[in-house]
């Protein structure tokens, strides 16, 4: 028999409060800002959807969004295959497993602003090992002045920082494959490529879906490392969406525009994640 | 197709084995005839899977040789040996259809596509998978998946041997019986050498013409199901096969006969005097007015017959009676069928009564 007791709702009140205060209330504040014009002295004037229109039409937003998509696209294209390749190359058993896992986990344990600071110094052309080394090898490399060099450094930093995450996830997927699959494949006469294509890749699919989603979201919202490394420069060449947003909100105190922009940003992230997820789990057996 | 010979095979998993206790397999010499249906029967951990993996090439033995038709393949890879193996858990290629799964071993070997189609159709027909051929293999039930694994094992018509490593473990009981008879039928149709590893005596005895019984890395006996039942070479085989297993009763051999507590049980010509054991299956133990004095402890109805547990001195002796037979109670006498009574010494068969041979 089914019994109803509405007092059960009390049980979920704490979590509702928590969600309300850490998500709903701040989000509604942003919504509130996004439809108003703000002046000092807490004066607000109704602005309707004007901010959204302005943001969506502004070339500055288009450029930042373009840079953002380019950055995310590049790092996904590098980190996912590279992570899978490293995971495949890692030993499956023996004492080296833990050594490899610890080495892989190290970059993930470093605070993000420290990562930015490390690469900032590492890549300096006059004193940094990387910067000095590249110039010594004959490359004209100065990431503080040359946009291409800045992008190169930024991508290299992100690959160094986050490929490990893909490696660890892919490795977890690989270790869950029973030996019998490899044995059966050997007996069936499968070549290494067929083993990868028909056993390893399908078995890694779930964790790779998660890896791609995580890497998409994190890279799409990246702020700290890039901010410390280049601060968005030289010029605006590495001004990604989040950096642009902070410039509006905290640099210019343009609260309405910044709020509208962050809502658009939020919806975009949600939308692309949803598309990724739907596409990747589309033909999953029920 | 090939005759498979194992010569002085030994295998240890650890490095530098010191004594026999370090070997998972101790000195195996075996010949598997071409086209035979064999079962490899033994308790868990007796080395049967190790032996199977040595034949398939997944493990290289520490010592000894594996010969296929007199060709030494001890170090050849599984693909070179041209064998097929079905594992305990179904192995299927999730992203492929049932058809592509069955075709996989053929395509990997560059078999022409028209022949692939023909073989796949044949095998699917035999395994009753034809309606599912176009489906994705991932969504199927475990028994259908295991049928696909078996199908991949049988799809090549030139394999030297098809090996099954406890293939029915994950299958529901009522389907087990069905798949087992299917396998038997398949063997009769394709006539490939088949080796079936199991710890389940029913599976072994129904599938195989010849059963190889293993214990602790040693082959204890090779024989037909009837031989294993009527003439166990070792008390272990007597215990392991049959339900309940063979009774083993301590006895003494003197003056050319076996004695239990002052009663002469049987003649034992050619057996040296001393301590020994009498082995007799419950099926051949009866009750009578005279014989070995014993006491009935309990009896249990097991459906088609009745198991009566007795004590002969300190030793437990089971007897199986027909369902409708009168069950004796209290003190009674046991009568052993002389043709089915054996003498064992140190576990191994020492002699049998004159009626036996």
Image (cartoon, coloured by chain):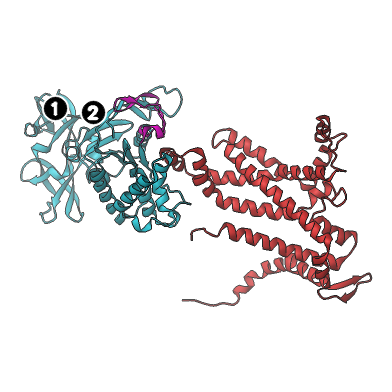
Q: Position of residue B228 (x, y in %)?
A: 20, 38
Q: Secondary structure at mark 1?
A: strand
Please state the horizontal and vertical placement of residue A206, each as a whole percent of the image.
56, 53
Residue occupying the point 25% across, 50% down: B181
Q: Sort mark 1 into few (<14), some (14-19) or many (20+) by Cα contacts within 10 Å.
A: many
Q: Nearer the viewer, residue B284 or A78?
A: A78
User: Based on the displayed image, in which of its 4 quarters is residue B59 positioned?
Assistant: top left
The answer to if B301 sits in the magenta stretch is no
Is label 1 in contact with label 2 (beta carbons under 8 Å)? no
Name the tint of chain A in the rendering: red
**Span colored in magenta:** B55-82
Which residue lies at the image location 27% right of the left edge and 52% below the top edge?
A: B177
Q: Quadrant of the N terminus of chain B?
A: top left
- Tag 1 residue: B253
User: In the figure, is residue B10 to the left or right of B229?
Assistant: right
The reply to whether residue B89 is in sight is: no
Which comes before the other along the chain, label 1 or label 2? Answer: 1
Query: How many dots with numbers?
Result: 2
Q: CA distance from mark 1 to mark 2?
A: 13 Å
Spot the cyan chain and give its letter: B
Q: In which quadrant of the rendered view does residue A243 lie?
A: bottom right
Viewer-nearest residue: B314 or B236 = B236
Q: Which subunit holds the residue at mark 2?
A: B
Labels 1, 2: front one: 2
Q: Position of residue A49 (x, y in %)?
A: 81, 74
Is there any visible trace of residue A123 in the rendered image?
A: yes
Q: Which residue is mark 2?
A: B346
Vertical placement of residue A46 versus B69, above or below: below
């Amino acid at each position: 028999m089914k019994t109803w007791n509405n007092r059960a709702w009390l049980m979920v009140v704490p979590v509702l409060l928590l969600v309300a205060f850490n998500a709903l209330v701040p989000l509604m504040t942003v919504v509130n800002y996004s439809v108003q014009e703000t002046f000092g002295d807490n004066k607000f004037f109704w602005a309707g959807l004007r901010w959204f229109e302005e943001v969506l039409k502004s070339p500055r937003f288009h450029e930042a969004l373009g840079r953002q998509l380019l950055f995310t696209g590049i790092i996904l294209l590098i980190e996912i295959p590279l992570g899978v390749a490293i995971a495949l190359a890692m030993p499956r058993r023996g004492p080296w497993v833990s050594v490899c896992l610890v080495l892989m986990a190290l970059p993930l344990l470093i605070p993000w602003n420290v990562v930015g600071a490390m690469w900032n110094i590492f890549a300096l052309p006059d004193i940094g090992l990387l910067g000095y080394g590249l110039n010594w090898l004959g490359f004209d490399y100065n990431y503080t002045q040359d946009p291409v060099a800045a992008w190169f450094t930024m991508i290299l930093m992100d690959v160094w920082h986050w490929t490990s995450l893909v490696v660890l996830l892919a490795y977890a997927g690989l270790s869950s494959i029973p030996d019998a699959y490899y044995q059966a494949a050997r007996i069936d006469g499968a070549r290494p490529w067929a083993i990868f294509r028909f056993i390893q890749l399908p078995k890694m699919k779930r964790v790779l879906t998660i890896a791609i989603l995580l890497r998409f979201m994190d890279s799409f919202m990246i702020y700290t490392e890039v901010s410390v490394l280049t601060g968005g420069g030289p010029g605006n060449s590495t001004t990604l969406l989040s950096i642009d947003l902070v410039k509006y909100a905290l640099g210019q105190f343009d609260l309405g525009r910044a709020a509208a922009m962050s809502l658009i940003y939020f919806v975009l992230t949600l939308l692309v994640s949803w598309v990724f997820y739907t596409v990747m789990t589309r033909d999953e057996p029920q | 197709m090939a005759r498979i010979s194992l010569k002085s095979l030994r295998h240890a998993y650890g490095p530098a084995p010191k004594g026999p206790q370090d070997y998972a397999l101790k000195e195996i010499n075996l010949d598997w005839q071409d086209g035979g249906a064999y079962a490899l029967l033994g308790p868990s951990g007796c080395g049967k899977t190790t032996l199977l993996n040595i034949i398939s090439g997944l493990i290289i033995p520490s010592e000894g040789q594996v010969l296929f038709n007199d060709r030494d393949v001890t170090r050849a890879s599984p693909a070179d040996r041209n064998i097929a193996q079905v594992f305990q858990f179904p192995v299927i290629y999730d992203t492929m259809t049932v058809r592509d799964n069955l075709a996989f071993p053929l395509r990997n070997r560059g078999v022409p596509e028209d022949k692939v189609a023909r073989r796949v159709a044949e095998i699917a027909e035999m395994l009753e998978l034809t309606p599912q051929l176009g489906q994705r293999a991932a969504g199927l039930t475990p028994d259908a998946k295991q049928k696909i694994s078996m199908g991949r094992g049988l799809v090549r018509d030139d394999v030297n041997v098809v090996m099954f490593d406890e293939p029915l473990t994950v299958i529901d009981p009522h389907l087990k019986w069905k798949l087992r008879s299917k396998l038997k039928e398949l063997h009769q149709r394709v006539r490939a050498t088949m080796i079936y590893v199991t710890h389940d005596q029913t599976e072994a005895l129904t599938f195989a013409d010849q059963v190889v019984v293993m214990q602790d890395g040693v082959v204890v006996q090779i024989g037909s199901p009837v031989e294993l039942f009527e003439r166990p070479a070792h008390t272990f085989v007597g215990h392991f096969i049959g339900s309940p297993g063979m009774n083993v009763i301590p006895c003494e051999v003197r003056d050319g006969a076996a004695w239990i507590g002052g009663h002469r049980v049987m003649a034992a010509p050619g057996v040296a005097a001393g301590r020994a054991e009498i082995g007799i299956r419950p099926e051949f133990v009866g009750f009578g007015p005279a014989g070995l004095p014993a006491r009935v402890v309990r009896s249990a109805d097991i459906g088609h017959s009745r198991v009566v547990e007795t004590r002969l001195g300190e030793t437990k002796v089971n007897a199986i009676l027909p369902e409708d037979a009168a069950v004796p109670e209290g003190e009674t006498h046991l009568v052993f069928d002389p043709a089915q009574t054996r003498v064992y010494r140190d576990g191994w068969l020492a002699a049998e009564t004159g009626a036996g041979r």
